Image (cartoon, grey):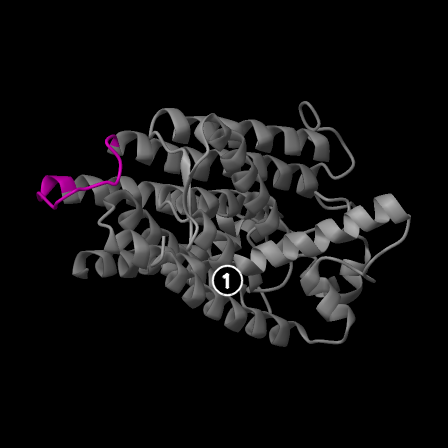
Amino acid sequence: MKVLLSILISSFIINSLLFIPYINLLYKIKFQRRRQKTKDVFGLMTPIFDKFNRKKAGVPVGGGLLIVFTTLILFGIAFALLYYFWYPLTSNYSSMKDEIKILLFTFLSFAVIGLYDDIRKTFFLNKDLFFGLRLKHKLLLETILSFIIAFWLYLNLNVQIINFPIIGVIDLGFFYIPFAAFVILSFANAFNITDGLDGLSSGILMIALLAFWYISASILDTPLSIFIPLWIGGIVAFLYFNVYPARIILGDVGALSFGATFAVIGLLLGKTFSLVIIGGIFVLEALFSLLQLGWKRFFKKKLFKVAPFHLYLQYKGWEEPKIVTRLWLAALMMAVFGLWLSQFT
């Protein structure tokens, strides 16, 4: 455990040293948030967001890019050093190489889609960039990636079961592929929806990853036990600059990558049910928005005044720091509850 804690601390220090010059660079190239003029991925975000969050316009975008870059580089270095010094490397799967491939591919591929979208929204807001990424194109690419990853989980790692507390193991067989793809796609967009207030999504993710880190360390899965603390170190460093009032925000490059990778870690750990509990705030935000969207389509009126959930709380008069802090506390208790449930699966 001393080695894993050292990895987390090293990641935090390195990311902390990089974020200040990185923020200055984003200001220099004007990679900053624009005013909300378009709808979000579910077609729900309206200009009302700016009514409560005008001050966020001009804040540098792309904090997630630095975390993705440093985490990938540090993972390669850490894994090589541990291998060189004969640290016991173990995995829950027969092919550690395939486990690492799936994990890193998810982290990087969804980041590429998010970065493309960030660049388009920042510099080409009303123009086509290359083939002109639209919401339907974005969802299509996310879906393709989700199915590729789900197929690898099923074929390369032979993952096809899900564990439910009390009920036991359910073997989905080939149907695990659409199930896993749905989970990955859902969490990628649920995280993106949640990423609306300073410190909200990253703080919840940090808490959830601590729970997953405990599980991965307890089952001696080296790739996840190394990757998660490296990722947490970057998130903690980012949160220092992202808490209210934020000096930098994740952007889609971080939101899509983080949400999808969080789901894949849950699937790799075999804790799908716990994933839904530990990531319960993300699930709540997504369900709130889906209910709003469905109600508008079928009944031609809104179910809630505004969506997603955190914006609804702002509409009801809650101050941003209060919303973030209370949802962090809720996420903490959900993580504890999810850990408790994981002992029964």
In the rendered structure, which amino acid carries the disc numbered 1? Ile
| Nearest the eye: 256 or 33 | 256
- Lateral position of residue 81 relative to residue 135, left or right: left
Does residue 30 belong to the magenta stretch?
no
The answer to whether 222 is drawn above or below residue 314 in the figure is above
Q: Main secondary structure of the magenta part?
A: loop
| Nearest the eye: 43 or 254 | 43
Say how many tags the image has: 1
The answer to whether 4 is drawn above or below residue 185 in the figure is below
- Point out residue 209 in the picture as x, y percentages from the top left corner: 40, 57
- Point out residue 199 in the picture as x, y percentages from the top left corner: 55, 64
| Nearest the eye: 134 or 290 | 290
- Lateral position of residue 244 relative to residue 155, left or right: right
**Residue at the right extreme, as displayed:** 300
Residue 243 visible in this rendered orientation of the protein? yes
- Lateral position of residue 334 relative to residue 119, left or right: left
Residue 36 visible in this rendered orientation of the protein? no
The span shown in magenta is 83-95
Give the residue pinned by disc 1. 204
The answer to whether 143 is drawn above or below residue 131 in the figure is below
Residue at disc 1, secondary structure:
helix
Q: Quadrant of residue 165?
A: bottom left
Q: Residue at x 43, y 61 (%)?
A: 338
Quadrant in which the N terminus is drawn: bottom left
Q: Quadrant of residue 135?
A: top right
Q: Residue at x 74, y 39 (%)?
A: 125
- Point out residue 34 in the picture as x, y percentages from the top left corner: 71, 50
Q: Quadrant of residue 196?
A: bottom right
